[in-house]
Every structure is written in structure tokens, then in C-alpha cells.
């Protein structure tokens, strides 16, 4: 769906305004080009971490956050959301899955201007982990990312991280078992 009808755009704008006033979304206007960026919390899924269940955000949603509780038999929750720029819903490409790597010493960062849209892990810290990435566009133009940053370390067994403001998740690294450290990479949307 490359073009959103006037009625759909109006509905999205009204819904965004209502969610913004309820504190459920964040809107940011960038100074360089005065684009209004609205991120709406969307799909959330909780899975048993070790089960090997691939989690992918629904069509046109991206990963905004992740939390984990306990060891490999604990639960992991993924938070997705959709992005609206100047009243236009951002289109998210089909996911591309990375190769697998050992979770206990893993590092993954999406390519430039790509975002995370999914993850799959099986087993404990010796099991494989892989990530799904996608590109963003609005009205046929690539949505660019800037100001990449890594979060401070947090203990994996009691971790929670979510994008701030006009950010999306672009990477994750983990060291050790459930008592080891996890960091997340975020990037800011510009248009």
C-alpha cells in the first residue's frame, strides 16, 4: 500500500492525536525539515525464551523494545509499533533474517537505515539467536536513521528496554547466561 487515502490519513492523524494526548505515543518535530514523527505502540508478544519461537512484528511495524525475566525458561516480551511521518504511515519492507550466532557471546547491529523487526532464540546461552531486519520508506522515499546509541548494560534475567521519543531498535548484544549483560542499540528517525 504505497498510498494512503485521504480518509485513512485523516483517521490515522485523529487516532495519533488521541493517543498522543493519552500519553501512549511520542511525537517529535525535527528541526532540519520540520517533519512530524509519531510512533504508536502496537503489537506485543510474550514467548518462552528457549522455545525457538520466531517473533516478527506485524506488517508495517518495527521493534521498539524488549524485556526478559528469568533464565532461558523465562519469558521474553517484544514490543512493536508503527511510525507515521507527516500523516503518512511508514512502510516496512519484508523481513530479512540474519544467520544464527551463539546467544552467550552475541552481537548484532542492523545495516545503516535498517531496523529490527524480529528475533528468534532457541535453548540456553549456548543456543542460536538470529534477527530479522527491514528498511523503512514513506511515499517511496527511504526513511533515514541517525544518532545511533547503545544503552548501558543491564542484567538479562531482569531486563527491560524501550525506544525513547523518535527512536527504533536497531541492535542488541549479550554476554554470558541470564546473569550476563545485555545492551540495546537505538537510532533516531529523520526524514
Image (spheres, rainbow, N blue to C red):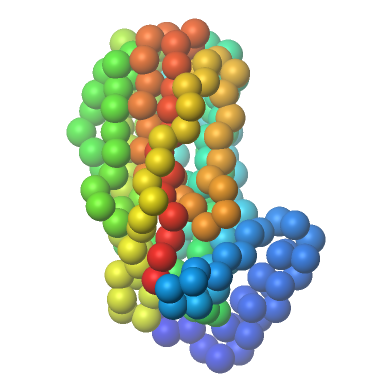
The picture quadrant where one finds residue 77 is top right
Q: Is residue 169 visible?
A: yes
159 shown above or below 88: above
Q: Is residue 59 visible?
A: no
> Residue at image x 45%, y 16%?
181
* Residue 7, position as x, y percentages in the image: 61, 89
167 shown above or below 51: below
The picture quadrant where one finds residue 162 is top right
Farthest left residue in view:
99
Farthest right residue in view:
22
Front residue of 50/142: it is 142
* Residue 6, position as x, y percentages in the image: 56, 91
* Residue 191, position as x, y percentages in the image: 39, 71
* Residue 15, position as x, y percentages in the image: 69, 72
In this picture, residue 167 sits left or right of residue 175: right
> Residue at image x 41%, y 65%?
190
93 shown above or below 95: below
Quarter of the image where the N terminus is located? bottom left
> Residue at image x 55%, y 70%?
29
> Residue at image x 72%, y 64%?
19
Front residue of 26/52: it is 26
In this picture, residue 43 sits left or right of residue 120: right
Number of marks in picture:
0
51 shown above or below 98: above
Amino acid at each position: 500500500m504505497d498510498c494512503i487515502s485521504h480518509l485513512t490519513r485523516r483517521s490515522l492523524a485523529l487516532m495519533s492525536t488521541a493517543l498522543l494526548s493519552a500519553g501512549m505515543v511520542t511525537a517529535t518535530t525535527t528541526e532540519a525539515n520540520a517533519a512530524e514523527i509519531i510512533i504508536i505502540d502496537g503489537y506485543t508478544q510474550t514467548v518462552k525464551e528457549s522455545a525457538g519461537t520466531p517473533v516478527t512484528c506485524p506488517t508495517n511495524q518495527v521493534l521498539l523494545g524488549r524485556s526478559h525475566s528469568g533464565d532461558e525458561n523465562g519469558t521474553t516480551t517484544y514490543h512493536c509499533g508503527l511510525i507515521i511521518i507527516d500523516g503518512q504511515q511508514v512502510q516496512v519492507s519484508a523481513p530479512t533474517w540474519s544467520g544464527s550466532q551463539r546467544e552467550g557471546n552475541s552481537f548484532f547491529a542492523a545495516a545503516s537505515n535498517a531496523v529490527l523487526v524480529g528475533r528468534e532464540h532457541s535453548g540456553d546461552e549456548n543456543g542460536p539467536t538470529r534477527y530479522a531486519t527491514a528498511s523503512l520508506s514513506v511515499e517511496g522515499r527511504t526513511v533515514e536513521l541517525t544518532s545511533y546509541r547503545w544503552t548501558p548494560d543491564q542484567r538479562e534475567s531482569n531486563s527491560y528496554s524501550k525506544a525513547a521519543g523518535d527512536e527504533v531498535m536497531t541492535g542488541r548484544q549479550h554476554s554470558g547466561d541470564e546473569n550476563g549483560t545485555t545492551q540495546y542499540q537505538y537510532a533516531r528517525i529523520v526524514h
